[in-house]
Image (spheres, coloured by chain):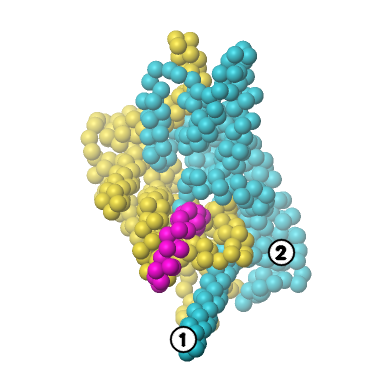
Chain colours: A yellow, B cyan
Amino acid sequence: MEQNNRKAWLYLLPALAFLGVFMIYPLVDVVIYSVEEGYNSASQTFFGYGFYNFDFVLHDAYFLQAVRNTLVLVAITVPVSTGLSLLIALGLSSIKPLRNLFQTVYFLPYVTNTLAVGLVFMILFKQTEYSQGLINLLIQAFGGSAVDFINGPWWAKMTVTCIYTVWIVMPFKILILTSALASVNQDYYNAARMDGASKSRIFFKITLPMIMPIVFYLIITGFIGAFKAYSDEVALFGTDLNAAGMNTMVGYVYDMLYGNGGGFPSYAAAAALILFAIILTITVINLLVSRGRR
Amino acid sequence: MTDTNEYGREGAKIRVLGTVRKVFTYAGLSLWGLVVLFPFYWMILTSLKNYGAYTSEYVPRFFTLSPTIENYLKAFSAVPLAKYFLNTLVFTLATTALMLLIIILAAFAFARLDFKGKDLLFTLFLSLMMIPNELVIITNFQTVTLLGLRNTFTGLILPSVTSVFYLYLLREAFAQVPDSLYLAAKVDGTSDFKYLWKVILPICQPTVVTIVILKIIECWNSYVWPRLITDNQAYFLVSNGIQEIRENGFGRENIPAMMAAVVAISLPLIILFLVFHKKIMAGVSRGGTKG
């Protein structure tokens, strides 16, 4: 046993070393950073301890803008993508021919580089000197007026961001929901059909309750993913998201750390902890609600 | 007689309804398929258009009669795209290989060996899954900067060589290998290490392959950490490269060349997906995240 003990720790040593240095130590350190006031990266000195960093971040116009953008993004993309993917998964599970083909095609965005494909969305929506861009031409064809989605008003930029985000997150949700629907026991459906239950009744009384835990799981991961949005925005609007007015909370953390306005790890730490607190709260609320329903 | 007629009519009505429903379902599914595929079609199409032709189209054409590869030549000559590819390849292979080695050893300890505090330690490991990367990246950035590892492969690779989630997946697979095999190996005098390499790994190969593929996708697409750690183009990965191209590449708004770079960057993963799509989808549905 004694020897086995030592051997086991030897096997664990690399994992423990890396996790210790790059995960556990940073976890403690980020809290320390967040309460060190006036930290200077170059000289590694600071004045004292306190909550000034949080105060600064919470009153920073850029942070508030980032919070607003993130909240709008979460509030729109999570319900839209969850609802749409449920609809598509239901459609998929009701057909036989071509089903595998559809499923494979739908998964394609998952394996693409978000920064690369974001550029395609950018050129589809962008106005340039020589063309309005495909989407604007479509809008005009239907009688609307063109708008610059990439450099134009806030709502237009938000619209593209939401569309791109939904496009990116759908593959995962469709995949999970399709396999959840496939695992519902067919006996329930057969019994319900025997009793002459209508399609909508079967959906609300059998299908939905059976897949509800998965839907909740998707909502929680969707919330967390949307709160951590960042690279999709970079793909559409470039790295200077503050100037574009499209920064997100994660983007604010990185910008504080590095880049044009960077060099303030303490502010970055405070913002990251605020983000973590929000995510944790939502996760706990979601868990409580889903447990209450069961 | 009238009764059967009634039933017959009902049956026909249901059949018609069913057909209508089918038509709508297929139409809707095809529509979403179009939404998914259109950006891919558009990037390939644009990358094949001549720069002059592209800028002269006020209403973009949905096909091209004179495809050209000049954009691809430009993409690989005007910016060091080949270098970005090579960097990403080195980064992906090194990260995946190192991570695999580390988690195989740890998963074996958790699945097969007995030691004090095993359950507690495993629970602690699992709870690390909740920690978002954004929280630890700040200190890691400072650590790597202080160690003078910015703009090096070591700095790029080291923080991503452990993954609690993949460790967990692997441990679950290892734990399913029957005890009797282990005991038999012990009787034969096989060492633990040899048992792990010659018996467990071949049995658990499907899980290992899944983990490798998922990690490759993750590495190929990683953007944030490389961006923080590299500002020297010689160490850019493809994500940073494409961002650099977006901001200052190819002179003034050469979108066809930009799309050629996008196609080149997307292609390796799409090929990987077409070959392994069953494995990838099964792996992701077992607990991938992103979304």
Q: What is the magenta segment's predominant secondary structure?
A: helix
Please tell me in which quadrant of the rendered image residue B198 appears: top right
Residue drawn at x 55%, y 77% is B19
The image quadrant that residue B192 belongs to is: top right
- The quadrant of the picture occupied by the N terminus of chain A is top left
Front label number (1 vs 2): 1
Counting the numbered discs, the total is 2
Q: Which residues are magenta?
A: A173-198
Q: Looking at the picture, how far across and down is residue B28, in whole percent?
A: 53, 71
Residue visible at 60% across and 18% down in the picture: B185
User: From the viewer's perspective, is B229 left or right of A73?
Assistant: right
SS for dot 1:
helix
User: Residue at 47% of width from left, 37% of height from top?
Assistant: B165
Q: Position of residue A280 (x, y in %)?
A: 31, 44
Q: What type is the residue that disc 1 sits on?
A: Asp
Per the rendering, the mark at residue A82 is: none
Query: Residue at image x 58%, y 23%?
Result: B181
Residue B241, magenta (yes or no): no
Residue on which disc 2 sits? B48
Q: Residues within 10 Å of mark 1 (few under 14, many from 20)?
A: few
Q: In this orientation, which residue lies closer to the viewer: B213 or A123?
A: B213
Mark 1 lies on residue: B3
Q: Chain of mark 1?
A: B
- Which amino acid lies under the numbered mark 2 shown in the image of this protein? Leu
Residue B64 location in percent, x, y? 72, 71
User: Cα distance, mark 1 to mark 2?
Assistant: 66 Å
Are there few (<14), some (14-19), or many (20+) residues within 10 Å of tag 2?
Answer: many
As drawn, the residue found furthest toward the top would be: A2
Nearer the N terminus, badge 1 or badge 2?
1
Relative placement, left or right, of B80 versus A233 is right
Element marked by disc 2: loop
